[in-house]
Image (cartoon, helix red, strand yellow):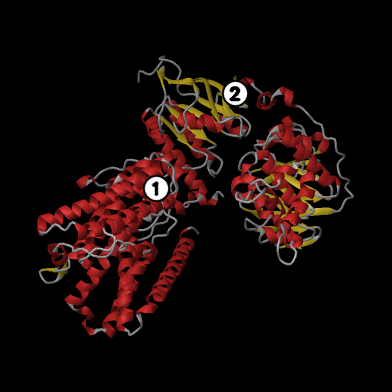
């Protein structure tokens, strides 16, 4: 009991930490899968194939990024499915052409996401609802609204949005990828704000966070609003991708976002994790589809493999975390 | 500084606070002088932690007033309290394990660098400066708090409070996990010379006498009085803590003879903070455990039932060496060991089910006919045991969460008895139940023992130990500190032992 007191706090070099963190593991999986993909599909390394892959992955990656904010604060946000459906339907029913129109559409999607997030945040932080219950409600409402606006798949997304956002910049850089880069840059900045640190604090222990002076309700609401905005952008990018509207477009996102978050090394118990990992996790899930397809595996098997990789990554991550802890708290 | 003679550093005037029908603080008044180290003493449940929460701005009082240096003090949050110069080192540490030492020290406002973002370098430098100032220069500010030992975390909690406390510093059990007490004493003396008033809460009277000049004693949510520690003997203080009228030594039961076979034999048991604990419980005997909060009683019960890992020692149930890995295994060893957990809501009741279903849970395989538990069979089985704990039959088909706390507790006691185990472990069996229910529960426990069963129970209420136990063991710092036979169990003796003073102990077990 007394011997520990004088023990100096251990130092550990940062790069090593990054490699064994969840983000490191999912990045490694991604590279390995991509190598396999290139082996089976020689044109995998072409700009065209890469752009296609990024375009496919971006909506899920943005949605997973949003979900990460809520998961780190120890919560679950189901409204992702509702927001994606609702924004997709609006993009198809009210297309606005030209760069100006695209900008207004983007802002509209963000605003809808922010509003839904704000409602979630108030329900949870002020009225004390459980996160699953509150967001289940808003998800169902949003899906209902989407059906009212468009009762069957149809509509047309503005051409400018469809063509520009799936294109490349200077023939090399996928435009959709820029949205991901923007999300990552904003995240890295947000992490270093008081609210960003508060996010990890309330995820670890709400009571202690409150005793440490963190404005718990405000941080929680901020997490939901930020998440909602990212879902809105995800819906926007999905519309660019599919060029049409579908009132149930968001439904597949529900499970896959959680899978991407977990695969990216963010434990669903909160307090830890990174948005970058979730983006890579989403990328991995989408890449896996391509790899299996190019390897000649029937698409019916995709789900089985996705689930398998997910569980494997988490088991591996936990094992590494345990080893590390043993090392540190000797 | 011109803060002199403007008034007391802190004046608390008839503060009261209730949670629903439960009165946590009835009327508490304290005056503290600038630069005074003032002790707050009282038993568990006397209201100390509620008072700490009110002073820290976490909880708002229902009535009464507070003032600091003559100015009214009504904090509306912990940050507000800090800006007014009041900070607390909480007993249940409030550090965040996933954040670094620097972040924990500087929350909720991190130093800003370029672009208005939090600067790791500046944060590190500020944290380094704070750590150095408080003699913790060997800590690396970038270390996540989760990897620190409990003792180091406690030091960090204390340092953080010191950095914010200009006028009033509250230390709530600061030495509970602290390895190096002198370090804290040095800091306290230094802060005292800066004319900060310090409210020092500790169960350890030796410490209190070393550091404090005066003490205020709380009992049942009231401040009983403030004494100069130099003029008050330990006995005076214990008496004020317990109250004169509480002296009762009525134990109607004859103690079980030494000849009775041993039901539960614990030898050198360690686990959690428990170290090297040995005792026996004989058949027909009721043994009480007395302890202040966090002295290892929780670990003792959880280790015996297999919920906390055993680090050393052995347990025998009815002469059978027990390898207890789960409550189920405990029940199957010897004549069985069953546990009534402390927290009814989260560890006891199954809220959606009827009272009868809750009670017969351990024996459903016995009452099932053809693999199905028929409602009639369930009720019949429940009815028999309901009578034992004096639970009215009409409650049996109610959903258990519709029952009052007292009746829930009766149902849970019935469940433990129904397991058929001959040794019961009861953790605070009458917590939060009314007087009438208490009597029924005592009756049930006595009857169980009279029929040859053995009971080991912990209670946070001393009168209960005095009433019920044939023998009382006092746990202190994870060890058995003293042991009293029925005749010698009285509240004041136990209170002394609880805080580490073995006055008049008949048997002091060397731990």
Q: Is residue B296 visible?
A: no
Q: Position of residue A100 (x, y in %)?
A: 10, 54
* Circle 1 chain: A
- Of residues B99 and B440, the one drawn nearer to the viewer in this rendering: B440
- Of residues A249 and B276, the one drawn nearer to the viewer in this rendering: A249
Q: In the rendered image of this protein, does residue A31 appear above or below residue A100?
A: below
Give residue B222's mark: 2
- Of residues B186 and B385, the one drawn nearer to the viewer in this rendering: B385
Mark 1 and 2 residues: CB-CB less than 8 Å, in contact?
no
The answer to whether A190 appears left or right of B370 in the picture is left
Q: Position of residue A78 (x, y in %)?
A: 38, 56
The answer to whether B126 appears left or right of B249 in the picture is left
> Which residue is at 63% across, 27% downward?
B220
Disc 1 is placed on an element classified as helix
Q: Quadrant of residue B492?
A: top right
Query: Which residue position holds label 1?
Result: A201
- Of residues B93 and B195, the one drawn nearer to the viewer in this rendering: B93
Decide: few, some or many residues near mark 2? Use Cα within 10 Å; few <14, some 14-19, many ≥20: many
Report the number of discs. Answer: 2
Q: Position of residue B397 (x, y in %)?
A: 69, 47
The quarter of the image holding the N terminus of chain B is top left
Decide: few, some or many residues near mark 1? Use Cα within 10 Å; few <14, some 14-19, many ≥20: many
């Amino acid at each position: 009991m007394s011997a520990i007191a004088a023990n100096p706090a251990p130092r550990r070099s940062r790069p090593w930490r990054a490699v064994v963190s969840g983000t490191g593991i999912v990045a490694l999986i991604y590279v390995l899968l991509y190598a396999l993909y290139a082996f089976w599909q020689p044109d995998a390394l072409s700009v065209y194939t890469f752009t296609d892959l990024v375009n496919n992955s971006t909506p899920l990656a943005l949605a997973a990024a949003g979900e990460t904010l809520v998961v780190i604060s120890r919560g679950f946000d189901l409204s992702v499915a509702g927001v994606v459906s609702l924004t997709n339907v609006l993009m198809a029913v009210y297309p606005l052409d030209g760069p100006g129109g695209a900008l207004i559409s983007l802002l509209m999607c963000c605003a809808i996401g922010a509003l839904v997030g704000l409602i979630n945040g108030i329900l949870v932080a002020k009225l004390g609802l459980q996160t699953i219950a509150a967001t289940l409600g808003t998800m169902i409402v949003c899906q209902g609204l989407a059906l009212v606006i468009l009762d069957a798949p149809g509509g047309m997304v503005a051409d400018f949005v469809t063509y520009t956002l799936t294109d490349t910049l200077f023939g090399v850089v996928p435009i959709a990828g820029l949205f991901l880069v923007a999300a990552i840059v904003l995240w890295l900045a947000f992490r270093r704000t008081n609210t960003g640190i508060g996010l990890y604090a309330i995820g670890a222990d709400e009571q202690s966070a409150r005793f440490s002076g963190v404005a718990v309700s405000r941080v929680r609401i901020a997490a939901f609003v930020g998440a909602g905005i990212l879902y809105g952008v995800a819906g926007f990018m999905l519309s660019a991708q599919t060029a049409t509207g579908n009132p149930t477009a968001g439904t597949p996102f529900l499970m896959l976002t959680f899978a991407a978050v977990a695969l990216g090394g963010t434990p669903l118990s909160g307090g830890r994790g990174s948005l970058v990992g979730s983006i890579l996790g989403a990328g991995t899930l989408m890449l896996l589809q391509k790899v299996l397809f190019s390897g000649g595996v029937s698409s019916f098997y995709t789900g089985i493999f996705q689930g398998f990789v997910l569980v494997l990554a988490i088991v591996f991550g936990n094992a590494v975390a345990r080893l590390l802890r043993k090392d540190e708290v000797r | 500084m011109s803060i002199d003679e403007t008034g007391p550093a802190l004046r608390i005037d008839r503060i009261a606070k209730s949670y629903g029908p439960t009165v946590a603080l009835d009327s508490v008044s304290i005056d503290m002088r600038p630069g005074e180290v003032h002790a707050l003493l009282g038993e568990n449940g006397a209201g100390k932690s509620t008072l700490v929460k009110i002073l820290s701005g976490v909880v708002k009082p229902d009535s009464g007033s507070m003032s600091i240096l003559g100015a009214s003090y009504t904090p509306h949050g912990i940050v507000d309290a800090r800006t007014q110069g009041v900070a607390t080192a909480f007993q249940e540490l409030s550090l965040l394990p996933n954040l670094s030492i620097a972040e924990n020290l500087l929350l909720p406002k991190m130093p800003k660098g370029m672009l208005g973002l939090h600067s790791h370098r500046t944060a590190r430098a500020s944290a380094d400066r704070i750590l150095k100032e408080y003699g913790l220069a060997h800590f690396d500010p970038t270390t996540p708090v989760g990897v620190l030992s409990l003792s180091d975390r406690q030091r960090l909690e204390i340092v953080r409070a010191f950095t914010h406390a200009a006028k009033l510093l509250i230390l709530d059990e600061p030495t509970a996990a602290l390895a190096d007490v002198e370090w804290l004493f040095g800091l306290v003396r230094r802060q005292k010379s800066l004319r900060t008033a310090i409210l020092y809460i500790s169960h350890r009277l030796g410490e209190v006498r070393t550091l404090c000049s005066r003490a205020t004693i709380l009992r049942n949510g009231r401040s009983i009085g403030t004494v100069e520690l130099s003029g008050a003997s330990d006995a005076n203080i214990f008496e004020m803590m317990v109250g004169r009228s509480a002296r009762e030594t009525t134990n109607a039961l004859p103690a079980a003879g030494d000849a009775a076979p041993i039901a539960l034999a614990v030898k050198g048991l360690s686990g959690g903070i428990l170290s090297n604990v040995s005792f026996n419980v004989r058949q027909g005997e009721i043994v009480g455990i007395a302890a202040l909060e966090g002295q290892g009683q929780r670990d003792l019960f959880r280790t015996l039932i297999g919920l906390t890992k055993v680090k050393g020692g052995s347990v025998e149930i009815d002469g059978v060496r027990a390898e207890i890995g789960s409550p189920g295994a405990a029940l199957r060893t010897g004549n069985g060991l069953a546990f009534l957990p402390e927290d009814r809501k989260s560890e006891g009741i199954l809220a959606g089910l009827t009272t009868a279903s809750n009670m017969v849970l351990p024996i459903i395989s016995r009452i099932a006919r053809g693999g199905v538990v028929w409602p009639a069979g369930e009720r019949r089985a429940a009815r028999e045991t309901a009578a034992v704990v004096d639970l009215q039959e009409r409650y049996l088909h109610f959903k258990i969460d519709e029952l009052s706390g007292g009746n829930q507790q009766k149902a849970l006691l019935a469940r433990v008895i129904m397991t058929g185990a001959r040794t019961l472990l009861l953790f605070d069996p009458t917590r939060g139940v009314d007087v009438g229910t208490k009597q029924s529960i005592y009756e049930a426990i006595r009857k169980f023992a009279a029929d040859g069963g053995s009971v080991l129970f912990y209670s946070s209420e001393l009168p209960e130990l005095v009433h019920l136990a044939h023998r009382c063991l006092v746990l202190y710092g994870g060890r058995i500190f003293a042991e009293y036979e029925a005749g010698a169990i009285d509240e004041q003796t136990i209170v002394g032992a609880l805080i580490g003073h073995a006055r008049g102990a008949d048997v002091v077990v060397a731990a």
